[in-house]
Image: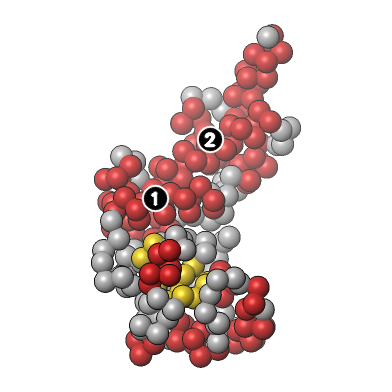
Amino acid sequence: MTKQKEQAPDHVFHIVDDRNDIPNQESLTDEKWRAILDNDPTYDGQFYYAVKTTGIFCRPSCKSRPPKLANIGLFKTAEQALAAKYRPCKRCKPTGQRLPDDEWVTLVTEYIDKNYMGTLTLNILADICHGSPYHLHRTFKKVKGITPVEYIQLQRIARAKEQLLASDKAISEVGLSVGMPNTPYFITLFKKKTGYTPAFYRQIHNETIREE
Ligand SMILES: [Zn+2]
């Protein structure tokens, strides 16, 4: 997933027709979708919306970025959302309680693990995971000992290593497939983290395998 943009009205009507495809939820009417997009506080308490890609649920009034319609599910109560394994948003606190830092960081980490191949910066991540970039950076580092950006890099390099050994893909393709379309940057970062260029890493490992 890359950019999320505000849904145009024609998307609203199109996807509302498909709402039966989304299991386990209150029916998503145009009215409710409008309430979510408008952050309308008069709907708070009537329903909660959860975003499947992040595992977070919110009150309709939440000021977080508008979700993609296809990714949301609705619940009548916060308890139902919790029972379906969604976690309360840090920003709008739909349960009235603060989401513990480690649980938030777990959600962020899971999101990175599934989306490292896309465009992922601290700002984008903070926006998607409903916190400020500053707060995310600090909290993530406190819980995991490294920053979110370092974690994204580690994840990308680990996946790149796998691909270098498991495929014949060109170096640029490997970089692209792990979210680093800028090949010189990919090579520089790979070398910084592993001590080898991607090509050399592939070569020495393949030689080792042949000798065995
Ligand atoms: Zn929220």
Quick check: can you spot residue 134?
no
Q: Name the element at disc 2.
A: helix
Counting the numbered discs, the total is 2
Task: Give the percent coordinates (x, y) of residue 68.
Answer: 55, 72
Pointer 1 residue? 106
Residue indicated by mark 2: 158
Q: Assess disc 1: are there few (<14), some (14-19) or many (≥20) residues with their C-alpha within 10 Å of its C-alpha.
A: some
- Given residues 12 and 187, the one toward you in this image is 12
Which image quarter holds the C terminus?
Answer: top right
Position of 189 compared to 99: left or right? right
Quarter of the image that includes the N terminus: bottom right
Residue at image point 59% right, 70% down:
23
Q: Specify the amino acid type for callout 2.
A: Ala
State the mark number for residue 14.
none
Above or below, 8 against 181 in this view is below
Q: Earlier in the sequence, mark 1 or mark 2?
A: 1
Residue 28: image x %, image y %? 55, 82
Q: Tag 1's secondary structure?
A: helix
Q: How is the image coloured?
A: secondary structure
Estimate the x, y position of residue 122 in percent, counting from the top left: 40, 55
Question: Is residue 12 visible to us here?
Answer: yes
- Residue at the far right in the pictured view: 168
The percent coordinates of residue 115 (x first, y second) are: 54, 53
Q: Please identify, in this view, whether the residue under mark 1 or under mark 2 is nearer the observer.
A: 1
Mark 1–mark 2 Cα distance, whole angstroms, equals 19 Å
State the image quarter where residue 97 is shown: bottom left
